């Protein structure tokens, strides 16, 4: 009888600690400790994420695998050492390619200042679509800063720690982005379904949308700068008895393949407490 | 000793869960490595230690998530406690018992997070959550339960060999 009782005391004490952590975090007292604790973890995670991403790129490309196999056969004696070298070189090449594209993008938008960051992880909850980057308040990042790649809008920073930050993706169901259609010159609100599909709602019923039309941020609401590509229209739902039409959007960013992102550091977002766009 | 082993193991599993498993998915489900470690260690006999692992592992997971800090810790401690309620004899005789325990533990784990998300005011679609996330995650957890529990039982036996009566 004694053992279950002592176990009950242990579970009770641990639950108390967990609830205390919950309360301390909610009141913001835990952040310094979290910053301290996450610093080494972020370094390990960055190391791991960069190598994993290089390895994934290597395995994902059939041509690369074939070339690699050939090389492995040819240089079997030096196999282990060369494999490491190939992975490392490909990692650098892939990173340089991405950075070059990002640099071109940054040059095309001289009014913005950017900070490049590596994606080091994703939210561990499958219900939340957010990513972690290896730059934080130490590098001048702040909550609300928009995040892009050369292809388009990724999301915005929702939480900042000393050495890392969390970005809420535009595919998260809690996100809403004010957008406009490039050709139809009309606006709408982009939201995400639970499965990550993007929908633009509240589009004027008289607007003439076309498939493949580019969707850009409108800048309304002050959360995102204007004219960042978001995606292309894949289908339109227009019914005469509805007040608005809706459009399904194919995002321009491949959210599964995000390795490096750019944070727009000179944009001053308007942060409201409510989740309205 | 179990805590010395637990901390780096849980740090590693939490990083793995955030980095590697972020893109390794079955439908939209992912295996819950920290949960499997906590259940596995409790099944291996480290019942009180598993609860502490729950607190440490849960806190680590919460650092990688938008979920409120402490929420994963609470459910992992509770799951470890529930596993500890049953004395070891039952599943020592049944090899497949870890599967049932993992199934129940995973269900409790995911429904807890649905409740937390609901309290956070997030949109919850139960059909989507069950069909695309929870059931695939349960499937992956159950598949990994047996090797995980056997690995941890083996590890515990190696670290804490049972005392022999002479």
Image (cartoon, coloured by chain):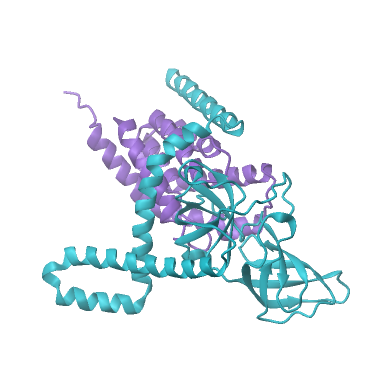
Chain colours: A cyan, B purple
Closer to the camera, A221 or A56?
A: A221
| Picture quadrant where residue A206 is located | bottom right
Across and down, in percent, residue A18 comes to: 53, 30
* Rendered-image quadrant of the C terminus of chain A: bottom right
Residue lying at the far left of the rendered structure: A77
Across and down, in percent, residue B117 comes to: 64, 46
For residue B152, above or below residue A52: above
| Picture quadrant where residue B129 is located | bottom right
Tell me, yes or no, if residue A164 can be seen here: yes
| Picture quadrant where residue A147 is located | bottom right
Name the residue: 45% across, 40% down. Answer: B60
Across and down, in percent, residue A239 comes to: 83, 76
Across and down, in percent, residue A29 comes to: 56, 29
Residue lying at the far right of the rendered structure: A241
**How many numbered marks does the figure carry?**
0
* Rendered-image quadrant of the N terminus of chain A: top left
Residue A141 relative to residue A234: left or right = left
Closer to the camera, B121 or B114?
A: B121
For residue B148, above or below residue A31: below
Residue A14 relative to residue A273: left or right = left
Name the residue: 38% across, 71% down. Answer: A60
Closer to the camera, B89 or A275?
A: A275
Residue lying at the far top of the rendered structure: A2
Residue lying at the far front of the rendered structure: A110
Tell me, yes or no, if residue B142 can be seen here: no
């Amino acid at each position: 009888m004694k053992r279950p009782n002592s176990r009950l005391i242990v579970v009770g004490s641990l639950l108390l600690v967990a609830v205390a952590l919950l309360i301390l975090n909610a009141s913001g007292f835990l952040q310094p400790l979290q910053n301290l604790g996450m610093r080494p973890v972020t370094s390990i995670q960055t190391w791991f994420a960069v190598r994993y991403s290089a390895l994934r790129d290597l395995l994902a490309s059939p041509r690369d695998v074939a070339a690699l196999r050939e090389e492995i056969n040819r240089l079997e004696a030096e196999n282990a050492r060369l494999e490491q070298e190939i992975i490392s070189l490909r990692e650098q090449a892939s990173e340089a390619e991405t950075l070059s594209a990002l640099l071109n993008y940054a040059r095309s938008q001289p009014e913005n200042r950017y900070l490049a960051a590596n994606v080091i992880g994703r939210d561990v909850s499958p219900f939340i679509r957010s990513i972690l980057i290896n730059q934080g308040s130490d590098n001048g990042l702040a909550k609300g800063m928009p995040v892009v790649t050369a292809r388009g809008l990724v999301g915005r920073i929702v939480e900042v720690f000393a050495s890392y930050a969390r970005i809420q993706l535009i595919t998260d169901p809690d996100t809403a982005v004010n957008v406009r259609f490039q050709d139809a010159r009309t606006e709408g609100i982009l939201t995400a379904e639970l499965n990550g599909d993007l929908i633009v709602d509240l589009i004027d019923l008289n607007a003439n949308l076309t498939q493949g039309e580019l969707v850009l941020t409108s800048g309304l609401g002050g959360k995102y700068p204007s004219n960042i590509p978001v995606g292309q229209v894949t289908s339109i739902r227009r019914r005469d008895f509805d007040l608005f039409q809706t459009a399904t959007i194919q995002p321009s960013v491949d959210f599964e393949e995000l390795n490096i992102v750019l944070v727009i550091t000179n944009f001053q977002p308007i942060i409201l407490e409510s989740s309205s766009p | 000793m179990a805590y010395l082993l637990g901390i780096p193991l849980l740090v590693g599993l939490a990083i793995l869960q955030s980095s590697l498993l972020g893109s390794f998915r079955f439908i939209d489900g992912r295996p819950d490595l920290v949960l499997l470690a906590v259940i596995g260690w409790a099944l291996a006999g480290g019942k009180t230690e598993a609860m502490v692992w729950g607190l440490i592992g849960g806190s680590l997971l919460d650092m990688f998530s938008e979920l409120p800090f402490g929420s994963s810790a609470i459910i992992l401690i509770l799951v470890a406690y529930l596993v500890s309620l049953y004395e070891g004899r039952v599943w020592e005789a049944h090899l497949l018992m870890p599967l049932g325990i993992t199934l129940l533990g995973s269900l409790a784990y995911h429904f807890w997070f649905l409740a937390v998300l609901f309290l956070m005011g997030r949109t919850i679609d139960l059909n989507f959550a069950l069909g695309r996330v929870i059931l695939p995650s349960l499937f992956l957890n159950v598949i990994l339960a047996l090797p995980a529990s056997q690995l941890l039982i083996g590890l515990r036996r190696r670290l804490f060999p049972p005392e022999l009566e002479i």
